[in-house]
Amino acid sequence: MTSIRPHSVGLALGLFIALWHVLWVSLVWTGVAQALIDFVFRLHMIEPPYRITAFSFATATLLVVVTGAIGYASGWLIAVIWNGRVRRSTAGS
C-alpha cells in the first residue's frame, strides 16, 4: 500500500464538505430548503420538527467555513492514520 499526503486528503474532504454546505446555503437562500427537509423527514416516516429560519449571509459564511475546516481536519487525520497503518503493514512484511 502507498502512503497519502495528509494535506491533499484534508483539502479534498474539506472542499467536498464545504461545497455540500454551499449547496444547502443556496437552498435556504432560494427558499427551497424547507420543502426539501420536510420531504426527507417524511421519507423516513418522521413528522418534520424543524423550521428553516431566514437566510443570513454571516451565518451562511460561518457554516461553510466551519464545516470546511472540520472536513480538512478529518481528512488530515484519516490520512495520518492511514499512513501509520501503511508503515506498520510494510514493516511487518
Image: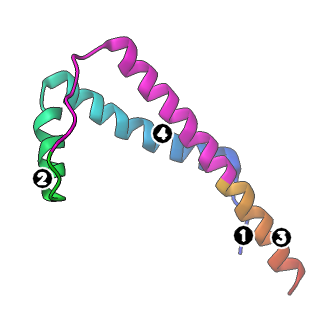
Q: Residues within 10 Å of mark 3 (few under 14, many from 20)?
A: few
Q: Position of residue 1 (x, y in %)?
A: 71, 75
Q: Residue at x 42, y 26 (%)?
A: 63
Q: Which residue lies at the image location 88% right of the left edge and 84% below the top edge?
A: 92
**Cα–Cα gap, marks 3 and 4:** 27 Å
Mark 3–mark 1 CB contact (< 8 Å): no
Residue interval drawn in magenta = 48-77
Give how far apart the Cα atoms at labels 4 and 1 are. 23 Å
Residue pointed to by mark 3: 87
- Amino acid type, mark 1: Thr
| Residue bearing the label numbered 4 | 15
Q: Which mark is residue 49?
A: none
In the rendered image, residue 57 lying in the magenta stretch gets the answer yes
Task: Judge left or right: residue 71 versus residue 47.
Answer: right
**Which amino acid type is marked by label 3?**
Arg
How far apart marks 2 and 4 lie (CA) works out to 30 Å
First along the sequence among labels 3 and 1: 1
Residue 24 at x, y percent in the picture = 28, 34
Q: Which mark is residue 42?
A: 2
The amino acid on which the numbered mark 4 sits, given as a three-letter code, is Leu
Tag 2 or tag 3, which sits nearer the N-term? Answer: 2
Q: Is residue 88 above or below residue 42?
A: below
Disc 3 to disc 1, C-alpha distance: 9 Å
* Depth check, front residue: 21 or 43: 43
